[in-house]
């Protein structure tokens, strides 16, 4: 059973997260030959204050 963990900065819409799940599931299914119903995708939404780039939080960078 393929399992993908995706880390995203908070703020994506439900539609965007749904698209990520659909596309990642399809890609894994195709790549490893697993039935789509066996693919699992877990999205981790990370608060902007807990994601750092270049020594600053994403929130401080205004992203």
Image: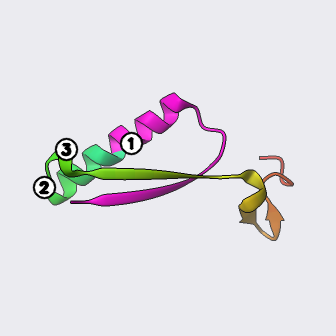
- Of the numbered discs 3 and 1, the one sitting upstream in the chain is 1
Element marked by disc 2: loop
Q: Residues within 10 Å of mark 2 (few under 14, many from 20)?
A: few
Q: Residue 62: percent from the left, percent from the top?
A: 83, 47
- Describe the element under mark 3 as helix, strand or loop: helix
Element under disc 1: helix
Front residue of 31/45: it is 45
> Mark 1 or mark 2, which has the lower sequence index?
1
Please report contact status of discs 2 and 3: CB closer than 8 Å, yes or no.
no
Residue underneath mark 3: 37
Q: Which mark is residue 21?
A: 1
Name the residue: 65% across, 45% down.
Answer: 10
Q: Residue furthest right?
A: 60
Q: Residue at x 42, y 35 (%)?
A: 19
Closer to us: mark 2 or mark 3? Answer: 3
Viewer-nearest of labels 3 and 1? 3
> From this viewpoint, which residue is outermost toward the top?
15
Q: Which residues are magenta?
A: 1-23
Q: Report whether 32 appears left or right of 40.
A: left
Image x and y of residue 28, in percent? 26, 53
Q: Residues within 10 Å of mark 1 (few under 14, many from 20)?
A: some
Residue identified by numbered label 2: 33
In the displayed orientation, state which residue is furthest to the bottom: 55
Mark 1–mark 2 contact, CB under 8 Å?
A: no
Looking at the figure, which quarter contains the N terminus?
Answer: bottom left
| Proximity of marks 3 and 1: CB atoms separated by less than 8 Å | no
Toward which corner of the image does residue 20 lie, by quadrant? top left
């Amino acid at each position: 059973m393929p399992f993908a963990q995706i880390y995203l900065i908070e703020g994506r819409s439900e539609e965007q997260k749904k698209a990520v799940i659909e596309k990642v599931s399809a890609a894994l299914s195709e790549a490893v030959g697993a039935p789509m119903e066996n693919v699992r995708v877990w999205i981790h939404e990370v608060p902007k204050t807990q994601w750092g780039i270049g020594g600053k939080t994403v929130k401080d960078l205004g992203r």
